[in-house]
Amino acid sequence: MRYLLDTGILLRLVHREAVEHGQVRQSVRMLKAQGHEAVITLQNLVEFWNVCTRPATARGGLGLTIARTRHRLRAIERVTMLLPDTREVCAAWKRLVFTHNVMGVQVHDARLVATMGVHDVKHLLTLNPSDFARYPGVLAVTPEQVIASQVT
């Protein structure tokens, strides 16, 4: 099975100072050990770059240099597969935002779900499963659930 890794997972995976780092790292390792594949999207990488390079004084920013961010991005790319953006993803995203009346910042989650649908990915590892509850067919799980072996 393939699991899309939400951006919050990617950030905590490479940011050792994050409270959730150990749990996220353990859950990703467990999924890989069980034979699952970790996948990401271009959007994940863009969001990751944004947070890493945003000043530490700004909300949620890590204040990393371009070089450190690039190094962390390479680490993520070594353990994940990038799903391609396609015209089909765009069409699926439009259907989702119209159907579910998606507004504001939630459009980003809808794009992840659109990419998942086009590439037949059902599972999502996230710190915020409630953000994806409106989308049928998306099985959003947390690192805690993976560690407790509540997922297959």
Image (cartoon, rainbow, N blue to C red):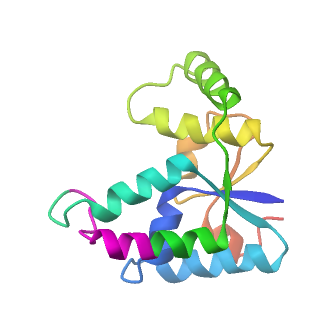
As for residue 52 lying within the magenta part, the answer is no
Looking at the rendered image, the quarter that the N terminus falls into is: bottom right
Left or right, 123 with respect to 24, comes to right
As for residue 61 lying within the magenta part, the answer is yes
User: Can see residue 4?
Assistant: yes
- Please tell me how many numbered marks the rendered image carries: 0
The residues colored magenta run 59-71
Left or right, 121 with respect to 105, comes to right
User: Can see residue 20?
Assistant: no
Q: Could you tell me which residue is drawn at 48 percent across and 32 percent down?
A: 107
Residue 65 versus residue 45 in the image, above or below: below
The picture places residue 49, in percent across and down from the top left corner, at 39, 59
Q: Nearer the viewer, residue 134 or 31?
A: 31
Left or right, 30 with respect to 58, comes to right
Looking at the rendered image, the quarter that the C terminus falls into is: bottom right
The picture places residue 65, in percent across and down from the top left corner, at 27, 71
Residue 26, quarter of the rendered image: bottom right
Q: Could you tell me which residue is drawn at 77 percent across and 65 percent down?
A: 37
Q: Could you tell me which residue is drawn at 65 percent across and 75 percent down?
A: 27
The picture places residue 15, in percent across and down from the top left corner, at 41, 77
Residue 117, quarter of the rendered image: top right
